[in-house]
Amino acid sequence: MISQINGTNAIQGYCIDIFLAAFKLLPYAVQYKFILFGDGDKNPSYCDLVNMITSDVFDAAVGDIAIVSVRTKIVDFTRPYIESGLVVVAPVKKIEVKCLGFLVTIYSTYVGCHCIFFPLCWSSGVDS
């Protein structure tokens, strides 16, 4: 969450801290000015924000803006600096299970072990 410190023009928040830490690593000085986006009561439209960057109203944006395919077509994003926890949800195809289908796994494991361990034992000269 980004907010303005009461009675000042200073902005605070985790994203701002990351931004300022990254700027300290630059070998040159860059002028910047933080401008809050939104009214503070409801969530702002991030699509509007991205469009304002493409129309030169803003040079860049700092914040928790989700990287979605529509936005990546019109602006560049940095690599995420935190794990978002977002996942992709897709339908699962139902697999037909045969009566003794579990034997396929057991058999393939049995054959795989013999293909690996038998040549090793045979080549090392182990007598049975």
Image (cartoon, rainbow, N blue to C red):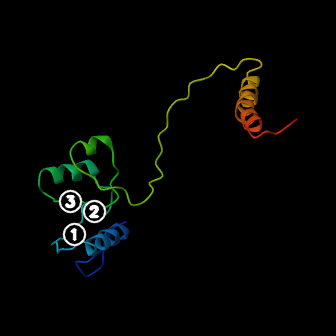
Do the residues bearing badges 1 and 2 touch, measured as CB atoms within 8 Å? Answer: yes
Mark number, residue 60: 3
Q: Which residue is mark 2?
A: 62
- Residue 123: quadrant of the picture: top right
Q: Residue at x 76, y 34 (%)?
A: 122
User: Which amino acid type is marked by label 3?
Assistant: Ala
Decide if residue 122 is on the left or right side of residue 83: right
Q: Residue furthest right?
A: 128
Gap between marks 3 and 2, in whole Å? 7 Å
Mark number, residue 34: 1
- Total labels: the figure holds 3
Mark 1 or 3: the one toward you: 3
Q: Position of residue 76 (x, y in %)?
A: 24, 51
Do the residues bearing badges 3 and 2 touch, measured as CB atoms within 8 Å? Answer: yes
Q: Position of residue 24 (x, y in %)?
A: 27, 75
Gap between marks 1 and 3, in whole Å? 10 Å
User: Which amino acid type is marked by label 2?
Assistant: Val
Does residue 80 lie above or below 89 as drawn? Answer: below
